[in-house]
Amino acid sequence: MVTVSGLTTASYATITVHTSKLGLPNGSNTLTYHSARVETSDTVITNCNQLLAIDDFESGKTKDYTLGNDIDCSAVTNFTPIGQDPEGWNGAYFRGIFDGKGHTISGIHINSDSYAGLFGSITDTTIRNVNLRNGSINATSGSDVGSIVGFAFNSSLENVSSDLVITAPTSWGVGGLAGYIESEPDGLQFGSVSNSYFTGQVTGSTSTGGIVGALDIYEGHSYTIRKSYSDAIVLGDNDIGGIAGSTNIGGASSDHDDSKALFVDTYSRSTVQATNNGAGGIIGNACSYTNPNNNKTTTEIDSSYSSGNVFAAISGAGGIIGQITCNNSSSNNEYKITNSFVAGRVETDSVHFAYGLIGGVSWHDGVDTFDFSNNVVDDSKAVVNGLATYYSDDTTKIVRTASTDPNYFFGNQSNAPLNTWDFDNVWGAHATDYPTFLAGPAVVDLHSAENNSAIRIVQKGCDAIDTSSSSKESSLSVQDPAYAYPTGLVGFTMSGCDSTVAIRATFSGSFDLSKVVIRKYNSLNHSFTTLTSANSGLVISTGTLNGNPALQVNYNITDNGPLDEDATIGKIKDPSGPALIIASVPNTGFGAKI
């Protein structure tokens, strides 16, 4: 018998959130988040009316929801955000898990002010595996506007996407996916946006970004944006970024540990425009503010790039960061840009503060640390002033790809900084284009239907994984009684496939390799097949997933071969496999399971 480990039940403490934000008038309103998970329900949503009927917070309860299919909300004139409280903080926020299971919600149209999005406000929540298409958000005032969520407190977004048009020209905290993300003491210490992207248009006033508008991190906390990108139009007045409009770190009243905002494996192809100050390819304005305990704050961008046009009408245009401001009395702040490149036009209307990496630095006491290494700037795009960075930096390479090496960033993994990137698991190289992620079209992250443990499917050989799902063996029309399925089964369909496709499935947990058998379920004839090295090139090994022990399964599928259930050339359907089976000797007894 094998025990799957590493699973925990989330717990929550009673905390108080102050709703004042940097750049806005101070407020005295507070919102108390009630204590531990008391009750959990798991509801399947299959239509827009059910989506609108999702309950907001009820004292002590956590609600979990999944989508059972794609949903069309185009018949709803004005969609009311889930967890929105139009009268102020009266506890109407959402807390729980919302898993779209890879499905799409289309036609959402929202006319609102603050806390506008599919979710108006969430706390201690994970939203994952959902796509928003062909919708819009219009906000005439207020703050916290994003297509997936307006305000997210100590929460994460995983494998989400949107192409919505978001128009909030007078609002603060406007993002393609999330308007305002806050990570504060006494809540979860680590959150993230991962495997997500935005391809629409977003217009805000201050702190407007392609992924998140404003990211606030209090002392002792860290927040990561990884394997995410924007390919959009991002417009506003001040602090406008291809990934984040602004990052703000610090500001605790008691002693806490160090804090960090980390952007790793991200890119922006977005057009970024600020009518005033602060436009950055990745971050519009990076801010480390009053830090009474002198704990270290770090803003770090690693293995990332910007290839879109970046423009600030007055000053502070940077290929990576538009400007660094508001360091106040704090003196232990670090800004790192490593293994990254800029390949877009960076300019201002004035002759000041337009640079390849950072557009400008102000309001600091001169003792901050700046760490730049292994960065590359393509100044053939006419970067104003033609400088690599605001500070002297001998490690930043200047290239003119239009004249000297037009393919410097294309299909060449030996050129800096690409020689440090992970092209096996994260990035895909293209002979005629900048690198893109394996994530999205080539990678899907799921959670086991049996125990909610993490599962990752990676494919090489198809243009995209079109659908993916996780199921329980007990839900199949025919069971496999000789084996146990502690993590259930996964299925997927793929398109644009070569004749042979390589699949790597990683299942989070601890497993005894001597008792692992991989089985595929055929939904057409309701039979099970054991995968072997002979029929699929099967290789089983241990590995890690999200830092936890995991089982790694590698095998091949041939288009129209015995493992493919779709007869269309170029399409592969593997509806319930690979199936992870844990067994000793197959038991042929009636209904017996190991």
Image: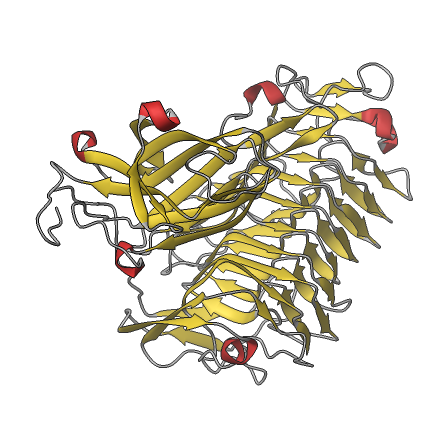
Residue 387, position as x, y percentages in the image: 80, 26
Q: Quadrant of the N terminus?
A: top left
Residue 20, position as x, y percentages in the image: 56, 69
Q: Residue furthest bottom?
A: 87
Q: Quadrant of residue 432?
A: top right
Residue 486, position as x, y percentages in the image: 23, 49
Q: Nearer the viewer, residue 523 or 64?
A: 523
Can residue 325 be seen here?
A: no
Residue 238 is left or right of residue 84, and the answer is right
Q: Measured along the vertical axis of the image, is residue 240 above or below residue 142?
A: above
Residue 19 is left or right of residue 164, and the answer is left
Q: Residue at x 24, y 42 (%)?
A: 581
Residue 383 is left or right of residue 80, and the answer is right
Q: Nearer the viewer, residue 281 or 266?
A: 266
Can residue 72 be seen here?
A: yes
Q: Nearer the viewer, residue 313 or 434?
A: 434
Q: Quadrant of residue 173?
A: bottom right
Color encoding of the figure: secondary structure
Residue 79, position as x, y percentages in the image: 63, 78
Q: Nearer the viewer, residue 500 or 346?
A: 500
Q: Measured along the vertical axis of the image, is residue 21 above or below residue 419?
A: below
Q: Residue at x 63, y 22 (%)?
A: 417
Q: Residue furthest left?
A: 589
Q: Measured along the vertical axis of the image, is residue 346 above or below residue 38?
A: above
